[in-house]
Image (cartoon, helix red, strand yellow):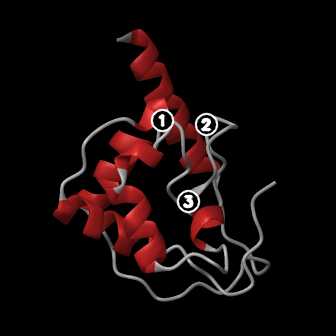
Amino acid sequence: MVRSLTAIAGLLALAACQTTSADTPERVERPVYGDVHAFAQAACGGCHAVDHNALSPDVRAPEWPSIVNDPDLTKDTLRTWLIDAHNYPEEMDFELNRPQIEELVTYMMSLKVSGYEPPM
């Protein structure tokens, strides 16, 4: 319990420190997500950065913006990867239903930006 609270406090502190500058790449207009963002944070945020300009808590887990800004990635390839659970590393072995997959694909693809550069 203490470990979870410490992790949450750390994430909140990190989010509070993040700023936007003129050097930030132009972002594609995207809708504001509520439940899917909370789900992404809860289910995936322990390992992956699920927002712009953030580093993944687990260095082995790529940041979502880095994943979706790969020129070879499409909605279809991302959807297939999320559906095909045997592709998952052991840490990601949990069930996603079709609506969750579609919401995650839509949210993740909204992280695509022109001129993307990965965080340091």
Residue that mark 2 sits on: 57
Q: Residue at x 46, y 43 (%)?
A: 88
Q: The C terminus lies in which quarter of the figure?
A: bottom right
Q: Is residue 112 above or below residue 29?
A: above
Under circle 1, the secondary element is loop
The residue type indicated by label 1 comes to Gly
The residue type indicated by label 2 comes to Pro
Q: Residues within 10 Å of mark 3 (few under 14, many from 20)?
A: many
Q: Which mark is residue 64?
A: 3
Locate residue 20 relative to residue 51 in the image: left or right.
Answer: right
Q: Is residue 119 above or below residue 16?
A: below
Q: CA distance from mark 3 to mark 2?
A: 12 Å
Instruction: Write down the quadrant of residue 98 in the picture.
Output: bottom left
Q: Nearer the viewer, residue 92 or 112?
A: 92
Q: The N terminus lies in which quarter of the figure?
A: top left
- Residue 76, percent across and down? 41, 77
Locate residue 1 relative to residue 16 in the image: left or right.
Answer: left
Q: Residues within 10 Å of mark 2 (few under 14, many from 20)?
A: some
The residue type indicated by label 3 comes to Trp
